[in-house]
Image (cartoon, coloured by chain):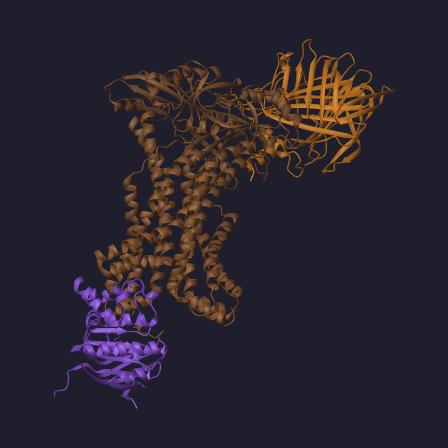
Amino acid sequence: MSAPPLEIQLRGLTRRFREGTREHLVLDGIDLDIARGETVALRGRSGSGKSTLLNLVGGIDAPDAGTVNVAGVEVTALTERERTLFRRERIGFVYQAFNLVPTLSVADNVRLVLELNKVSARSASARIQELLDAVGLADRAASYPDVLSGGEQQRVAIARALCHKPAVLLADEPTGNLDDSTADSVLALLDRLVRDSGHTMLVATHSQHVAAQCDRVLELHNGKLQPAA
Amino acid sequence: MIPVTYRASFSYLLRHPWQLVLSLLGIVIGVAVIVAVDLANSSARKAFLLSMDAITGEATHQVVGGPNGVSEDVYRSLRTEAGLTRIAPVIDGAATSDGLSLQLLGIDLFAEQSVRSFTGDAQDISSLFVSFLVEPGAVTASEQTAQELGLEIGDRFELFSSGRQHTATLVATFAADDSLDRVLVADVATAQEWLDLVGWLSRIDVRIEDGDTATLERFERALGPGTQLLSASGRTRSTAEMSQAFMTNLTAMSLLALLVGLFLIFNSVNFSVLQRRGLIGVLRALGLTRRQLLTMVLVEAAAVGLVAAIAGVLFGAVLGEQLLELVSRTINDLYFRVNVTEVSVSAFSVAKGIVAGVGAALLAAAVPAIEATSYEPRLALTRSVLERRTRHVLPIVTATGIAGMVAAIALILVSGTSLVAGLSAVFLLILGFALCVPLFVRAVSTLIAPLAGKLGGTSARMAVAGIASGLSRTGIAIVALAVALSATIGISVMVDSFRGSVNAWLQQTLQADIYTGTIREGSMEPELIAAIRAIDGVVDMSTRKRATVEDASGRTQLRVFELPPQSYDGAELIDAEPAPAWQAWESEDAVFVSEPYAYQHAVGAGDVITLPTDRGPRQFDVAATFQSYDINAKGIMMSRATYARHFDDDTIDSLGIYLAAGVDVDAVIREVERLSKDTQSLYINSNAGLRKESMRIFDRTFVITDVLYWLTLGVAFIGILSAMLALQLERARETATLRALGMTPGQVGGMITAQTGVIGLLSGIAAIPLGIVMAYVLIKVINRRAFGWQIDMTVAPDILAVSVIFAIGAAMLAGLYPAWRAGRSQPAIAMREE
Amino acid sequence: MRLTFTLFALLAVAVVYADKASEPPSQLAELLSADAEGYAKAIEPREFVFPDDHGPHPDFRNEWWYVTGNLDDKDGRRFGFELTIFRFALAPTKPESESLWRTNQVYIAHLAVTDADEERFFVAQRYARGALGLAGAQARPFRVWADDWFIAEEPGGAWRLVADDGDFAVDVTLRAQKPPVLNGADGLSQKSSQPGNASYYYSITRLQTEGRIRVYGREHEVSGMSWLDREWSTSALADDQVGWDWFALQLADGSDLMFYGLRLTDGTQDPHSGGTFIGADGAATHLDQEDVEVTVLDTWDSPEGGTYPSRWAVTVPRFGLDVTVTPVIANQELFTTVRYWEGAVDVEGSRHGERISGRGYVELTGYAQ
């Protein structure tokens, strides 16, 4: 059996932050290969660079050195506008703080992404229905985010992140703002949906529990990546 | 040492400099406009009062007479027969030299000492004394005036008065402050010759000690029926009051700018407080009391207000100088001569500006500060809770607004003719309406959001929905813009209606083909009138004499006409049948009163009024009220025959010339020019030319209005800019999420621009009803109360369309920078952990 | 700021430098000594015609009507009064003008009342242009006036003199007891050796006076004797002349003495000084400088500065007159256009060895700056 194709390939990825006169090396020549459909957990202390790594993979940030290749696209070679379009099509984000658009209903939050991807209104509606069903919020389609609980909001966020069938799902502490039982159910949902649709997922987390769900767990320490103990 | 808490709070402002700058700017402009208008008004008024004071000197009373003034025989008899020697003759008239308007004052040096006090140094003046008396044309002026005219002592120069040229000699200068700028002083004899007043004095200045009733009685006994002794300060006051309505209106407009500025300040301060609710929560948690927090916020607001108010006062002084020219020009056009060369910055004006600025900032900060400090000391209130609160208070706010508008209407109905009450009602109306705007905005934007979604997709829906959901931010900006716009609509409609009415009135009033007359003052040479009458093609002439009569109740302008019957159509008689009214006007002691006069004195056809005449007070029937927009003619129209029965004056100051059909107007104008060239310089204008000239002066009068409302719009523009920037800051995370989800900077910016465009649209739409109501109130209440005019209101659709388009354009322009900023924002922010 | 024209201040100084002791009094002199070109001059004796010569002589630069008098009320309260109306021409001819205000003539009037019992001296003045009827003079009927002050002929030939300044007033009727006396050489009174530096000068030395004087708001019925001096000229003091002392004495025997002494800068008396002695019958005799001897017996220091002579011995040997002249009160100084002393005096002494008394007026100029 041939190895599944690589979805994410990082080479020599380096990112520094300047803080006053001091330079802080957050990522120090990271190399990482993630296969299609693989789920990888990224652990590390606060400020160890987990979010930075996700931002680089998602094309939100650009590295000081090294390359990012996602789904065969050399992200680091793209212009800002190309990266935006790449992100729009190939990346799904789930945040700790949910980050739903407060002025849009649940359905519209999802629709926004589909619309950006020029999905026709008809198939968009079908897809929204399908996803809201999948996250168990079909009855809250017309609700606005501010009336939803945290868990519900994160489910909407997951639906929004997956609606356009991205190549890679990037999740940054997806359960960080949730209580344990809610976190469990959201995590279960995320895991199921990702595995069902064969998405590649890179999740930054503190949670042992989250990490345990993943195929592989890596530890980010002093800018270097190493398999978790 | 600034306490750490204050530093924590203030560093927020420093880290958001644009917000600081914009809130400063709002106060600066608001204060500047108030201070500028106040300075311009008070400088003009002060200059007038000072020059009146300087010219009146120690005179406590003045003897005034009929249209020509006081006969010099009255003066002689007061002195030599009644033995009233503390009196001085004054001749007061206008002259020009080198294009400069001058006041020409004729005095008798021998009499001066009895009414004016002198100081100064003795030099050799015997020769000066001689020349002043025996050398025709000798004048003196203040050093500044001489300098302005480019004259040295001994220089001869040309002077125009009563349409003729005279040669004057500057025989001396005197040191004086600017209250005597542009005043030439000559001997009575010289002034009489130049101003065509031989035999007459403009008035006699009198000095009577307080409580000296014996002397008052001696005057009463000595003065004949055509003359009266009036209090000098009363006369000055009544002259100054002529322009009061105009100045009150200007002040009201400046307050409007501050009101709009207040919204803006409120917006900025409110926002900066809300932004810090997290910080406030932390500080509360750390143990700061509510009072301490409230004090902190208010101290900060006061500091910001003070800095801005000081800048506003400085800017206001500069702006005031510009306005002063407009104000004094209008006063000169409409009311009385005033020479203002510089703004006199009074402590009172400055204090008003400072108080307004600091007060506005405190007021604007108080509401959010009280709200913020009322939070439980737990961490940040979420935005949605805040918006929910806003939604909760909305009905209360709206109800208050409706109550305000109802109160405004009630105030108008019960306040009679009070101008100040009328203007207060306008402000109440604006405030009331302003309070209703947020509900309107929410209703409309909620209503059209789905529609926008259908038309423009989710991002369009987001743009529109964002307005309603961000009402706590956008609401105030929309209100500010709507108020500014409604003011421009109201004022534009008012001016436009006024203009239309005046134009129609001029068209009707100006019946003759050619108008000619003396410029500003003086009467036409009888020979010249005869020569004009003899011009080929002239079939008829109307004559006019402008005369002022005065008694203790003030001055009344008489317009004395000799009219050919065909020009009767020129006067629109409002409350009487034309035929009998004209009959009475021509042949009985009956007059027509102008609308402003009728309004002010509450008289009309059928009433009787008393006027001072050369034969003493006489009663006249009011035969009709006629329509008039002539600001100075709170006046009376009298026939020449009636005038001749009551006044010893046969002078004429202007003519209306009627031509036979087919006669070339320009040829006759040229002939009149030729005839008058060597005798008297006259204005000569065709019917159309005079109308045009009148409209030009009309438009000039409203230049200051334009300036003020552009400033108001400027303030509103800054309001939108500031609100949108604030909103973008607030929504940084949301914007970042959208960017992370794959929206391009262009899409994000476009969305924000669309949002501001809709804000402009909503403001524009909201402004229309208030603008029209305001126009109505301005026309039917304010103008009527201020000037007594009746104006037909016409609403030109293009004014409304232009306003809405302007609103959209301005709002989108204000949205450009926030849009650009939002587009540039780093999506990475959204990824940060909270 | 009031109308503080320096100009007016200057004029006020020139025309009326009242209350300004520190101001130099030279302006009027300058005014008078300014170019005399174009004016008529007193060079030759002329024929005086009355009443025409009571009227003005506008071709001459200056002229005055000078009435002084000593009066008593019914209770014996003693009063002196002076009403002088000066006329000055500012230019030789009247400028052309439609305006009646235009003129070259200026009138200044001084009114003074001496209240001997209360030792009070009242002064007021008027000044007006000689135009529009504000001030002027005419011969037929005779009238000279400034504002509401006037001396005018009444029906019946008597003159009425009225001047009221509110605080005090004089309203009297004057009846000439003697015909006009021509002073100097038939009325030509030479003031220096320079031709033209002379005046035409006549006096009516006895005018029976009846009427009222008001001081402190109270009218006093008064009667007594007044004196009229009339002089017109285009002359002024010569450079070496500093002032003059003028005596007008009415003696109890019906005779009158007028004498003026012109003082020179060196302290001596100018030989052009002179006078007239008028007998009870009205016969006038011209007196030269050497005919009259005046010796100062006492002086008075003005509180405003300057020292005036205040008592004199006057002798006229030709007429056997030897009298002492004493002011009724010391302070009779006028702070008017020109600062001078003019006051009522008593005369005591002898004539031809017989005791004689009298009253009169003395004018002293050039003593105070």
Q: Is residue B318 visible?
A: no
Q: Is residue B672 above or below residue B384?
A: above
| Image-based side of B724 in relation to B277, left or right | left
User: Residue B811 at x, y = what percent?
Assistant: 31, 53
Q: Is residue C64 visible?
A: yes
**Chain identifier, colour brown:** B
| Image-based side of C195 in relation to B747, left or right | right
Q: Is residue C33 above or below residue B490?
A: above
In the current view of this chain or complex, which residue is farthest to the top?
C156
User: Residue B454 at x, y = what percent?
Assistant: 22, 57
Pick whichever, C283 or A190, lies toward us: A190
**Chain identifier, colour orange:** C
In the current view of this chain or complex, which residue is farthest to the bottom?
A229
Pick whichever, B624 or C232, lies toward us: B624
Q: Is residue B202 above or below residue A96?
A: above
What hue does chain A carry in this figure?
purple
Q: How many marks?
A: 0
The residue at the point 36 percent across, 61 percent down is B726
Quarter occupied by residue C350: top right
Pick whichever, B654 or B609, lies toward us: B609
User: Residue B369 at x, y = what percent?
Assistant: 47, 61
Pick whichever, C364 or A150, lies toward us: A150
User: Residue B334 at x, y = what percent?
Assistant: 42, 34
Quarter occupied by residue C351: top right
